[in-house]
Amino acid sequence: MTQSDSSKISERLYLEDSPAEVLRMLLNQEGFRITEQRQKILQVLREVPEGEHLSAEDVQDKLTASGEKIGFSTIYRALHLLVDLGILRELNLSEERKFYEFCNPLMGAHHHLVCAECGTVTEFEDSTIFSLGSNEALNRGFSLLDCQFTVRGLCPHCAPSLSV
Amino acid sequence: MTQSDSSKISERLYLEDSPAEVLRMLLNQEGFRITEQRQKILQVLREVPEGEHLSAEDVQDKLTASGEKIGFSTIYRALHLLVDLGILRELNLSEERKFYEFCNPLMGAHHHLVCAECGTVTEFEDSTIFSLGSNEALNRGFSLLDCQFTVRGLCPHCAPSLSV
DNA sequence: CGTCTTATTGATAATGGTTTTCGCTATAGA
DNA sequence: TCTATAGCGAAAACCATTATCAATAAGACG
Ligand SMILES: [Mn+2]
Ligand SMILES: [Mn+2]
Ligand SMILES: [Zn+2]
Ligand SMILES: [Zn+2]
């Protein structure tokens, strides 16, 4: 890609581009630099199977496992940046740490069912919830950033064991 | 109240009783002791105006302001206990700390709209969301504990200041 | 009411996820 | 290629929450 393409880049739809190009495009737009670390960190989040959620430590573990050595500061900074760019979603699943997932625009907004005992997270889709939240925000003059619907309960595996 | 009433207590509906009695009843049921601290901490949460949410530190500050000296360990333990008893709700509003609110059974389940910039929290009601979450949990064999729908955005006051 | 058992308290230390610091490195533009 | 500076990372700091443990007090029993 040459520099003369730069004006065209921002005009294209994200869906037409590879994830690497999207990242490059967004970083450029905001004046951020394209670094090996940011690309690798995003790649980890993209490679994860649908429905899995990673903590900052999980991300580093995966990077370490594939021979990459990236410091915690960099991981936290990159995750925040990617969230701000709308590439990742930060999940507050009531646990002590935050989780991150790739924000797939193709996939309808999904939500989470969490077992309070074992922490298992199950995803479910529902478009009405998202539009409800969107309306609520816009009606009050808020610009919308994210909707998170989190249901907490006890999974079939954990519920019986508590009554023993 | 005499000890001979104890059998009647657990038969009564919560709505007929004063909050202090409800607490007494629930603690008794589970074999916990009724302490000054637990009663004072619950009172703080009940006195708070509708729509306000308190962190553990907020609770201690209010207690200190009214001349009560209760240690942090006790406050955290009491908050967790009250949540387990279903008296309080623990909110994960995407912030770094957790917030607590009195779980009013009369009030329909409400949800939260949070400004990502200034942290302002606005409540809104919607019964469909709650039933959606409830169905989702039960369909998967989960017992339901809580549903939290949190919408993040920028409030009218914060949104403009970012584009300057 | 006094005694006993043990749940509870609270000052303090520890924990653990996240952020900050700051000297070094590498990106992007000239 | 050269330079300015955004970004990196090891280490320290931060901060909400939890664990410790000796002292205290709730509740049961007589
Ligand atoms: Mn998910
Ligand atoms: Mn509320
Ligand atoms: Zn479970
Ligand atoms: Zn705001």
Image (tube, coloured by chain):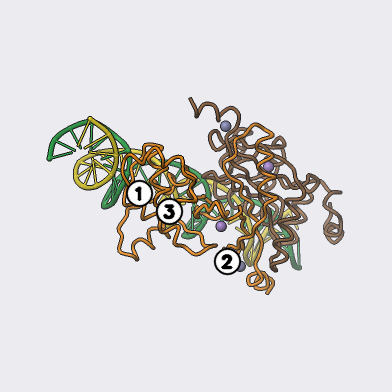
Chain colours: A orange, B brown, C yellow, D green
Q: Which of B61/A21 is in front?
A: A21
Q: CA distance from mark 1 to mark 3?
A: 23 Å
Sequence-wise first label, 2 or 1: 1
Find residue A76 and report its horizontal and vertical position in percent.
40, 49
For label 3, the SS is loop
Find residue A73 and report its horizontal and vertical position in percent.
35, 48
For label 1, the SS is helix
According to the picture, the residue beneath numbered tag 3 turns out to be: A18
Answer whether residue B20 is visible to the viewer in this image. Answer: no
Amino acid at pointer 3:
Ser
**Residue visible at 52% across and 62% down in the picture:** A52
View extreme (top): residue: B164
Q: Residues within 10 Å of mark 3 (few under 14, many from 20)?
A: few
Badges 2 and 1, same chain:
yes
Whether residue B55 sits left or right of residue D4 in the image: it is right
Q: CA distance from mark 2 to mark 1?
A: 30 Å
Find residue B30 and report its horizontal and vertical position in percent.
72, 62
Whether residue B28 sits left or right of residue B70 in the image: it is right
Parent chain of label 3: A
Badges 2 and 3, same chain:
yes
According to the picture, the residue beneath numbered tag 1 turns out to be: A74
According to the picture, the residue beneath numbered tag 2 turns out to be: A118
